[in-house]
Image (spheres, rainbow, N blue to C red):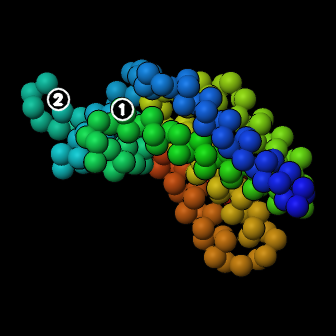
Amino acid sequence: MVNKIFRLGAVLIPLLSSNMILGLATRHGLAVYSDSDTYIVGARSIQQGHGFTIKTSIGSYDPVDLFPPLYSIVLAVVSIRKGNVIASARWLHLVLQILSVSLAMILVGWSTSWAPGAMFMAGLSWTFATDYLAFQCVVYSESLFVMWSTLAILLMCLYLKHQRWIWLLAAAASTSGAWLTRYAGAAWGFSGI
């Protein structure tokens, strides 16, 4: 019984503390920079049915080709109910934080025969990574990119262990998600060659 409580605490403490820290850091909303504006405008344009475009000064719509579209698509989808892309981005980042910390702890747990101490340290290391937390507090695509990338690593490990094509296909899909979130995701494709 004590062992189960210890294992549960090793998982829940990093998850809860990571979201509490991010929630407190973003209680007044996420920061917005020039790149953020492209994602926000792109999400609003998608919601209005114009695709991943930016309205020009003459009223026409030009496609966005400097930024990948997936983060704006996800922002558009999660903000449908509220209508506020920036407020919805905060909740999206909180969910992505839980997913990313969970994936990191699963990856470490899987590679250490589910050692609760190792999983706990992985979760806390992720939680207190200040550079990563700084990016989580801004309307940037990094949080979605990191989630896709961590998932791709986990799925590739599963493929290498079990040699089942479904894991390889899932890893490829996750790598594609990373690529469609940040063009730096192309490195995942090249690293698999």
**Tag 1 secondary structure:** helix
Mark 2 surroundings: few (<14), some (14-19) or many (≥20) residues within 10 A: few
Query: Is the residue under label 1 in contact with that under label 2 (CB below 8 Å)?
Result: no
| Residue tagged 2 | 56
- Residue at figure coordinates x 78%, y 53% from the top left: 8
Asked whether residue 111 appears in the rendered view, the answer is: no
Left or right of 126 on screen, residue 115: right
Left or right of 63 on screen, residue 133: right
- Across and down, in percent, residue 1 comes to 88, 61
Mark 1 surroundings: few (<14), some (14-19) or many (≥20) residues within 10 A: many
- Residue at figure coordinates x 68%, y 24% from the top left: 130
- Across and down, in percent, residue 113 comes to 90, 61
Q: Earlier in the sequence, mark 2 or mark 1?
A: 2
Nearer the observer, 58 or 11: 11
Quarter of the image containing the C terminus?
bottom right
- Residue at figure coordinates x 32%, y 36% from the top left: 85
Mark carried by residue 86: 1
- Across and down, in percent, residue 107 comes to 77, 55
* Residue type, label 2: Thr
Measured Cα–Cα span from mark 2 to mark 1:
22 Å
**Tag 2 secondary structure:** loop
